[in-house]
Image: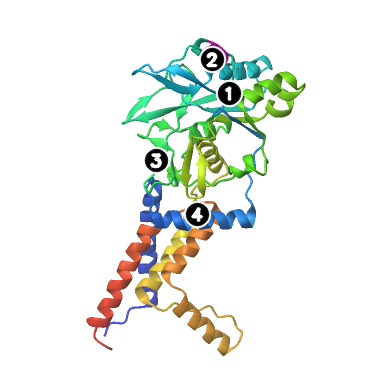
């Protein structure tokens, strides 16, 4: 009977491991996720937060401005009645404040979509024209770009969900429409993305800044827009203390809230955390790829050829026996996959969705066991 050498086993395992890696990369390059992936990653995020208490590692301080309390009724241009929009007079006053002080803020991300015309548009446009380092959102509606009503700097600020919860941020639409995190990375950090073909076009954001850090622990300055305008006039040195050289994030933190894998998350924080994830290098690289191919090859060997040699710890025969029992009875390829997801996040800051690939592995494992039990002749 032909005896297959161990070298052939290794070649098959490595080849299948490379194929698994390609499939994994393709899955993670897209925006699709499953409930199982989101459930695992929500726990990984909690684990990472408890172990490392991840901080943004940013060179500038953040200040957050809420516009949900500063609304104004405006006639609906499309049908009868009024609609509620952000008070653009107050927005104009805020941007005028920045311009009057020499535009010494670091950046202002204004997640307020200027969808409809307003009586105050001329004042807002004049203020934004004087203000530097500013970005507004635009959106896609039925594959049609919906630009803001005013001519302001803007980037695409859409994100999609497949399970009813936000989990993954798609960075590029139609291969050319750049989203806000991508524009921020290129504008503020002068970095191109993707920098290699390994970089994903969709990423799982790491949540460096959570809502509770704004509302409860108050780790970051947080103001309502109208209150900030009053304080800036009544408090000497307010601009220097809270706005100068700072990254300002403006948006509706009360009602523009989305369900995510880590709980309810305001839209402005989704955009900011996605940018910080990109900036902090949380994307695929060659070292990560080699690690993944190695693990996938180990999984393939375990899947096709059963027992894996236990490591020799040189601690006596009884330790070797215990190690062999542990490796071959308590370590499964599904457990290895779970460990791979955790290590990929903790070590390389790359979060993965593995559910579909794990389903494939389970199916192959079932058919191999079924064949060996019912059809393979005993040797």
In this view of the protein, which residue sits in the foreground, 260 or 345? Answer: 260
Q: Quadrant of the C terminus?
A: bottom left
Measured Cα–Cα span from mark 4 to mark 1: 34 Å
* Quarter of the picture holding the N terminus: bottom left
Q: Residues within 10 Å of mark 2 (few under 14, many from 20)?
A: many
How much space separates mark 1 and mark 2, taking CA atoms? 16 Å
Q: Residues within 10 Å of mark 1 (few under 14, many from 20)?
A: some
In the orientation shown, which residue stands out farthest toward the left? 375
Mark 1: which secondary structure?
loop
Q: Which residue is mark 4?
A: 42
Asked whether the beta carbons under mark 3 and mark 2 sit within 8 Å of each other, the answer is no
- In the rendering, at what x and y percent does residue 308 appear? 44, 77
* Secondary structure category for the residue under label 2: helix
Range shown magenta: 123-128
Q: Is residue 339 visible?
A: yes
First in sequence, mark 2 or 4: give its number: 4
Crowding around mark 3 (Cα neighbors within 10 Å: few <14, some 14 to 19, many 20+) is some
Instruction: Please name the residue that numbered disc 2 is placed on.
Output: 124
| C-alpha span from label 3 to label 2 | 30 Å
* Label 3 vs 1, first from the N-terminus: 1
Cα–Cα gap, marks 3 and 1: 27 Å
Q: Can see residue 347?
A: no
Residue at the disc numbered 3:
160
Magenta-span inclusion, residue 127 = yes
Type of secondary structure dominating the magenta stretch: helix
Q: Nearer the viewer, residue 350 or 45?
A: 45
Residue drawn 40% across the image and 29% down it: 139
Q: Does label 3 or label 2 sit earlier along the sequence?
A: 2
x, y percentage for residue 106?
64, 27
List the residue tagged with mark 1.
133
Please identify the quarter of the rendering in which residue 160 is found: top left
The numbered mark, 1 or 2, whose residue comes first in the sequence reads: 2
């Amino acid at each position: 009977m032909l005896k297959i050498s161990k070298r052939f086993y290794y070649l098959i395992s490595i080849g299948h491991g490379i194929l698994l890696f390609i499939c994994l990369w393709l899955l993670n390059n897209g925006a699709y996720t499953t409930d199982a992936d989101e459930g695992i990653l929500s726990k990984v995020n909690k684990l990472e937060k408890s172990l490392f208490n991840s901080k943004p590692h940013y060179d500038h301080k953040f200040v957050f401005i809420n516009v949900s309390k500063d609304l104004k009724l405006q006639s609906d241009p499309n049908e009868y009645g009024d609609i509620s929009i952000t008070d653009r007079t107050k927005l104009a006053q805020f941007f005028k404040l920045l311009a009057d002080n020499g535009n010494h803020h670091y950046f202002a991300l204004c997640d307020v979509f200027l969808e409809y015309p307003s009586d105050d548009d001329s004042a807002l446009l004049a203020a934004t024209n004087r203000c530097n380092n500013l970005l507004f959102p635009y959106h896609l509606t039925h594959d049609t770009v919906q630009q803001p009503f005013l001519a302001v700097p803007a980037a695409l600020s859409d994100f999609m969900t497949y399970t009813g919860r936000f989990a993954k941020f798609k960075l590029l639409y139609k291969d050319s429409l750049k989203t806000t995190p991508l524009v921020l990375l290129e504008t503020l950090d002068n970095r191109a993305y993707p920098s290699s073909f390994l970089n994903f076009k969709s990423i799982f954001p790491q949540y460096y800044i959570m809502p509770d850090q704004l509302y409860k622990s108050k780790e970051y300055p947080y103001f309502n827009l109208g209150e900030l305008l009053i304080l800036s006039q009544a408090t000497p040195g307010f601009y220097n203390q809270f706005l100068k050289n700072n990254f300002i994030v403006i948006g509706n933190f009360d009602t523009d809230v989305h369900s995510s894998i880590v709980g309810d998350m305001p839209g402005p924080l989704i955009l900011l955390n996605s940018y910080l994830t990109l900036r902090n290098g949380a994307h695929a690289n060659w070292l990560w790829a080699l690690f993944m191919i190695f693990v996938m090859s180990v999984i393939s060997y375990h899947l096709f050829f059963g027992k894996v040699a236990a490591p020799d710890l040189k601690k006596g025969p009884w330790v070797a026996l215990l190690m062999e029992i542990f490796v071959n009875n308590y370590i499964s390829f599904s457990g290895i996959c779970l460990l791979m997801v955790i290590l990929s996040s903790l070590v390389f800051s790359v979060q993965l969705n593995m559910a579909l690939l794990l389903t494939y592995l389970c199916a192959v494992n079932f058919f191999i066991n079924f064949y060996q039990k019912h059809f393979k002749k005993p040797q």
